[in-house]
Image: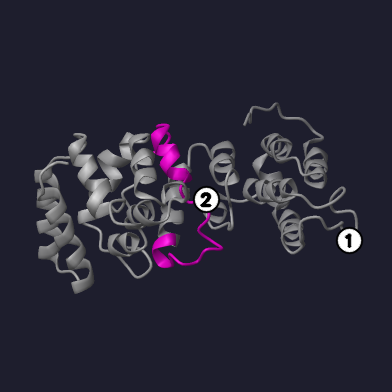
Amino acid sequence: MRAEVVVDEPAEALLWAALREGRRDDAVRALLALPADRRRRLRAPVRRHDRLVGSRAIGERAPAGEWAGELRAGHHSAAAAAVLGCSAVEQAVTYAPLIPPDSADLPKALFPGQLDAFAREWFARFRRNPKAWDRIGGLDAPFDWAHEGLIPAPVDDGAVLYLITSVPRAQDGPDLLRYLEARPCLVEVTLRRIFDVDGIRGASLAQRDERERPGRRMADFVIPELVRRGHWTAEFVEDGIRRALARGQSPYLARWFTRLAEHVAAPSR
């Protein structure tokens, strides 16, 4: 997504035209051509537009010409871009839902130097309520930003819990291993904290493994494979297990760490 623009006077008119046509990237370009104070003054009307678009079903016609033709996903994306672009970062990070590819693209285009603020708030949001499915879509974007070197690999508790339970592209054990190996910083930094972050209801290693088939779980596949492939050592895992158990775990979670210890200690397949 190209965001480079030259400031020009009709940018506000171009923004509204992009919103009517559902052209997200044109909306971004128009926003970046507007001075910050003008964008802030537009926040109330673009939020009203976003609420209207969000309240109607895909395929509907606009009640008073607010969008052209039938409502499309592009109208939702353009409206989200307008709200974010007219917000201070403290407001923008709370916007939801923001789904892919908008969750990855829009913060990068509109707040390139403040991506860490999105990562902090998004993972705190997940930690507060990991079952709020209408608000936690797209939260994996910071993992890609970290891989691209745009932010440090996140270490927040919510980031760790989201990584081990909720990345949409990594629900199966082999898929998660591929996802991690494609983003080495997550293996080296974020995932290493699994022994120091307590699971919560709705997001824990034990709950993840309950829904997976034997041989494709964190305890019997992902972590043993990380050791077998040389990403981690057995000693690192065993020390982490001791640390987690010494800190105190519920019987449910303690059983998971005990199973992990058995798999890591078993001879290589």
Callout 1 secondary element: loop
Callout 2 secondary element: loop
Q: Is residue 127 magenta?
A: yes
Residue holding disc 2: 138
Q: Main secondary structure of the magenta part?
A: loop
Question: Badge 1: how crowded within 10 Å, few (<14), some, or many (20+)?
Answer: few
The residue under the point 76% across, 56% down is 58
Q: Amino acid at mark 2?
A: Gly
- Asked whether 111 or 172 is in front, the reply is 172
Q: Is residue 222 magenta?
A: no
The reply to whether residue 152 is visible in this rendering is: no
Q: Amino acid at mark 1?
A: Pro
Quadrant containing the N terminus in the rendered view? top right
| Region of the chain picked out in magenta, as a range | 126-152
Residue holding disc 1: 63
- Asked whether 45 or 174 is in front, the reply is 174
In this rendering, the label closer to the viewer, 2 or 1: 2
> In the displayed structure, does residue 83 sit left or right of residue 115?
right
The residue under the point 20% across, 45% down is 224
Indicate which disc, 2 or 1, sits on the residue closer to the N terminus: 1
> In the displayed structure, does residue 53 sit left or right of residue 200?
right
Quadrant containing the C terminus in the rendered view? top left
Q: Position of residue 165 (x, y in %)?
A: 37, 56
Q: Position of residue 201 (x, y in %)?
A: 35, 70
